[in-house]
Amino acid sequence: MTAIWWVRDDLRLHDNPALAAAAAAGDVIAVHVDERIDGVRAAGGASRWWLHHSLRRLGDSLREHGVPLVLADGDPEQVIPQLVRETGAEQVQWNRRYHRPRRDLDARLKSALRAQGVRAESSDGFLLHEPWTIATQKGEPYRVYSAFARACRDAAPPRPDDAAAPNLSGPADEVHAAGHAMAQWRRAEHLEEILDRRGWVPTAPDWAEGLRETWTPGEAGAWDRLDALEDVLDDYARHRDRPALQGTSRLSPHLRFGEISPHQVWRRSRELGPGEGPETFRDELLWREFAWHRLFHLPELATRNVRSQFDAFDWREDEDDLRAWQRGRTGIDLVDAGMRQLWRTGWMHNRVRLVVGSFLTKNLRLHWRHGEEWFWDTLVDADEAANPFNWQWVAGTGDDAAPYFRVFNPERQQERFDPEGEYVRSWLPEVGTGDRPAPLVDLRASRRDALAAHQRLSGQA
Ligand code: FAD
């Protein structure tokens, strides 16, 4: 019997319930679909770079077991049934996803396959807790992180250790010969060819050098970061806000693409002990859960203020200021260093994300959506939930968010969290040479203007 594993944000062999279910059923064919779905943004540039490399590595690992990875594009509601027909597969397995338009598509496809007598099943492979299983006593979604996190900690513990990869086998040659997609797979070079044709790796200009230097996409790279967790967790509570240090796990893109499961990360942090460091780290994993919980209940999180009174807020529109922020040319050292780190490596330290976000939405008073979109395109960990959730948090427009009137002073933040200026100098070597733009805004005056705009909004309410 042949089972199809529809690969989505679960690019791993270990602790993967959908793959395990497919492998238990028989021979496995993996398929990844480059899909376009109404109401869902296409992946940004940095994410596409990541996906290219991660798919290649997954394809190589699967090939060792004789399992094909078919790369398709188009509408999954056409592609998957066609592959089922071509291969005679009797099952399709996938791990669930949580953004409404994607869920709707999956539900339609599941019914259609079942109507044709194909066993179609979904599993939980992306989160510690399915979003609908954590609810208030009234059965409503949580809006406050601390109560949500308590509920998660009281819920069933993460899965026990089943980290081994399943025994895999691929389909027999006759199946390979069937159909167009499978025929492509038989040519060993097809994976690279198809990926190259997609143009997800930049060539002219090649902006990915810093990404290559910083990251190893794929399951093995994720395990390396997991193995390094013990170097980080002891001091995590003290060092996590210091951007010059390697004080955090840098697991975010690996979690984003499901190259490692959150259960594995949670378990490892438990093995590394109780204590302030591991506990604080687990709180961060629960922020990830909370962001997905909110997106599950608020599918328009990336486009709509959660607190709708902000619909009337007096945001400025200024292309030049936005461009200066994007390019790291605001003249404010910590902001510019962060934006350069982002551009170069596809990642920015969390403390600095907070500072650049506050600067954009308060000192420059530009809409948080501009920041969210830039991050969407440039972050390797750009996430449908965490990115808009955190932007709304910084801007004060979200649930349980920092209030708008809490404006970070980037200079004060630098004194506290980068006191020797190491981080700033590493991304802005020109600091102190005089070759810096003048500050785009006066920090105090722009803060006053932001607070006045907020006052006007409160006056209207
Ligand atoms: P660690 O400190 O080692 O934390 C471990 C894991 O917990 C992370 O890998 C991540 O999966 C999760 N996590 C930590 N903090 C948060 C948080 N605040 N919200 C949700 N999950 C969290 N994170 C993303 O994964 N994708 C995004 O698109 C994203 N956009 C952000 C935008 C803004 C404006 C801000 C302020 C934060 C954003 N974050 C985002 C959250 C956070 O900055 C990153 O998760 C973190 O910096 C990743 O580094 P790390 O893996 O070393 O984190």
Image: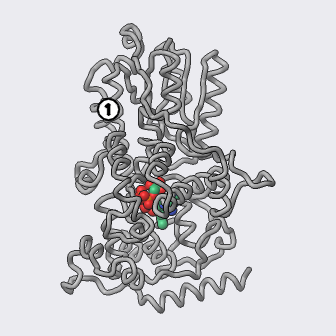
Q: Amino acid at mark 1?
A: Ile
Residue 223 visible? The answer is yes
In the image: residue 192, left or right of residue 264: left
**Residue at the (67%, 64%) spot, across then down:** 144
Q: Position of residue 207 (x, y in %)?
A: 26, 56
**Residue at the (37%, 46%) spot, across then down:** 48
Q: Alpha-carbon neighbours of circle 1 within 10 Å: few (<14), some, or many (≥20)? A: some
In the image: residue 382, left or right of residue 53: right
Q: Position of residue 51 (x, y in %)?
A: 37, 42
Q: Position of residue 452 (x, y in %)?
A: 59, 88
Considering only vertical position in the picture, is 275 above or below 107? below
**Residue at the (48%, 76%) spot, across then down:** 358
Residue identified by numbered label 1: 194
In what quadrant of the picture does the C terminus appear? bottom right
Considering only vertical position in the picture, is 19 above or below 365? above
Res. 350 image quadrant = bottom left
Q: Residue furthest right?
A: 138
